Image (cartoon, helix red, strand yellow):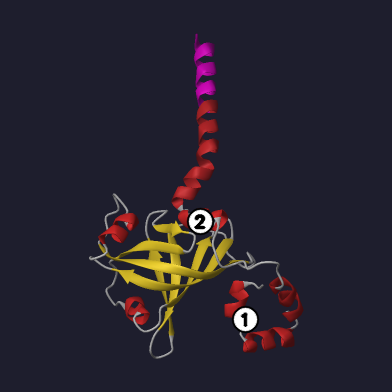
Amino acid sequence: MSNRFADIAFTPTVKAVQEKLGSRAAYARAELVPEPYHNLPSAPEAEFIAARDSFYMATVGETGWPYIQHRGGPSGFVRVLDERTLGFADFRGNRQYISVGNLLTDDRVSLFFMDYANKTRLKLLGRAKAAGPDDAGVLEKLAVPGYRAAVERGLLITVEAFEWNCPQHIAERVTPEEVQGMSATLLSRIADLEAQLGAGEGGQDA
């Protein structure tokens, strides 16, 4: 069996370039696995996706040009619906509808999920389709209560393959919420010390 991601991404031309530049042997060994993998996300991938508040999605239009779109929302707005399907509420943006239009002629998508704080990224290949007002059950599963944005449609993605990517060259960045989480213990300790100091000063005055 083989590595599903490599089956799709490592075309003959890509393999020829790997051979020319000296990386083909290492990737060839990695492709020889006892069973198919990198095709069905499991718990680590589901947990990683559920923690993200944004991702990047690439589609290809009729001109042959790729188009990359950033999609964001509250953490967890991308749902792992089953072992093969992701879904998310598509919130109203600038209304160019380039990705939506591209999917009408080519349903293939490439997704990048980034965790800048931990310098980690997950690449995913799949096939996407839209769920509109007539798909009330699907939209209900993708709803994000309390998020003030208009939902125009749902997007369902059937996963074809995924791969965890090398952390090299990922710039480490953190969100305000991540800063708060990392500094909570420190701030609590500072508050305790200040309280102890205040109590000590009060005792001296007495």
Q: Amino acid at mark 2?
A: Ala
Find disc 1 in the rendering and name its residue. Answer: 10
Pinpoint residue 131: horizontal percent, then vertical percent.
30, 67
Q: Which disc, if any, is residue 46?
A: 2
Q: Amino acid at mark 1?
A: Phe
Residue furthest to the left in view is 133
Q: Secondary structure at mark 2?
A: helix
Dominant secondary structure (helix, strand or loop) of the stretch shown in magenta: helix
Residue stretch rendered in magenta on the structure = 194-206
Q: Is residue 182 left or right of residue 16?
A: left
Q: Is residue 132 left or right of residue 6?
A: left
Q: Quadrant of residue 119?
A: bottom right
Pinpoint residue 145: horizontal percent, then vertical percent.
30, 50
Q: Which disc, if any, is residue 190?
A: none
Pinpoint residue 94: horizontal percent, then vertical percent.
28, 72
**Label 1 to label 2, Cα distance in Å?**
25 Å
Pinpoint residue 170: horizontal percent, then vertical percent.
59, 65
Do the residues under discs 1 and 2 have CB atoms within 8 angstroms?
Answer: no
Above or below, 204 relative to 64: above
